[in-house]
Image: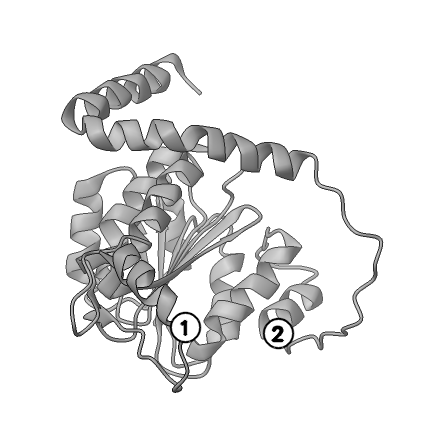
Amino acid sequence: MSIARKASDLFRLAQAIVRQPRLALSLLEAVPYSQRGFNFSRNWQQSDDESRFSYPTMPNRMQEFCDALVEGPGVWKWDHYLDIYNRHLQKFMDREVHVMEVGVYSGGGLRMLRNYFGEQSQLYGVDIEADCKCYANDHTKIFIGDQEDRSFWGDVRKQVPCLDVLIDDGGHEHEQQITTLEEMLPHLSPGGVFICEDIRGDLERFNAFAYGLTSSLSKMTPYQPDGIHTTAFQSNIASIHCYPYVTIIEKANAPIPRFVAPKRGTQWQPFLEGKLMKDLQ
């Protein structure tokens, strides 16, 4: 990381402490637990017991495409990405879907996505290299620009009013990834999927950013008779998934106004009632 980028990060840290001291204190209090999890993962010891379950492998059109690819425009992906992609994206297969890939490179990724989603898919490629314009065709539009430039994303949003899937395989710098997410995640359609690839390294800054997102997803407002009213973020974000080198965010199919926990059954331990209600306040 450059000295200028480090200086910028330190300046942002100082700003955060001054602007939101209570939040900064909460984050500092969380540091020992982050360190505890870090150490637990570093010292992981797996049980010798073998699993008694056998899990069937899901059909994966993307894996089949990559396995058959021996020449032509290249695809450069970690193998474990393909199963992850299929898990989250198969609901879009063979239907009209609008998909954006940030980081076009040699064009192989666009061909892979077209094969996976089918002939009804509309693709958008984003790259900083002007030569990538050559990959444009009747179902693929190419945008040339810097993914860290917010004004660039403003122009993209005007030209792409509907977007269901965004895959960030661009510059891999944390500020590029964060800017892309901030500018484009709100723009995704309900039920849309945002994928950020190649988040590598211990204590990586995008992961720190994602921690802030997951923490906000767990926020609790005061309990009301009709449930816990969601924040704007909770209302629109269904889930956040962390995989090796990949973070995936799924948007809700429709806004979620509140979280409810209806009681079911007839027998309850009375001594817990007061404590449970107090915990929800």
Considering only order in the chain, which callout, 2 or 1, is on the residue closer to the N terminus?
2
Identified by mark 2, the residue type is: Asn
Q: Residues within 10 Å of mark 1 (few under 14, many from 20)?
A: few
Which quarter of the figure is the C terminus placed in? bottom left
Front residue of 125 and 174: 174
Q: Position of residue 193 (x, y in %)?
A: 38, 64
Q: How far apart are marks 1 and 2 (CA)?
A: 48 Å
- Left or right, 8 with respect to 265, comes to left
Which residue: 28% across, 27% down? 25
The answer to which image quadrant residue 176 occupies is: top left
Display coloring: one colour
Instruction: Mark 1 vs mark 2: give the one in front.
Output: 1
Which residue: 36% across, 27% down? 28
Front residue of 27 and 148: 27
The answer to which image quadrant residue 234 occupies is: bottom left
Q: Where is residue 99 in the image (x, y as percent from the top left)?
A: 37, 66
- Residue 268 in sight in this render: yes
Identified by mark 1, the residue type is: Gln
Residue under pointer 1? 269
Front residue of 132 and 204: 204
Q: Where is residue 103 in the image (x, y as percent from the top left)?
A: 43, 48
Which residue: 79% across, 66% down? 51
Which residue: 40% across, 49% down? 132
Residue 224's tag is none
Q: Residues within 10 Å of mark 2 (few under 14, many from 20)?
A: some
Which quarter of the figure is the N terminus placed in? top left
Q: Position of residue 85 (x, y in %)?
A: 52, 64
Instruction: Look at the numbered disc 1 and give the secondary structure of its residue.
Output: loop
Cβ–Cβ under 8 Å for marks 1 and 2: no
Relative to residue 233, is residue 60 depicted above or below?
A: below
Residue under pointer 2? 60
- Left or right, 177 with respect to 198, comes to left
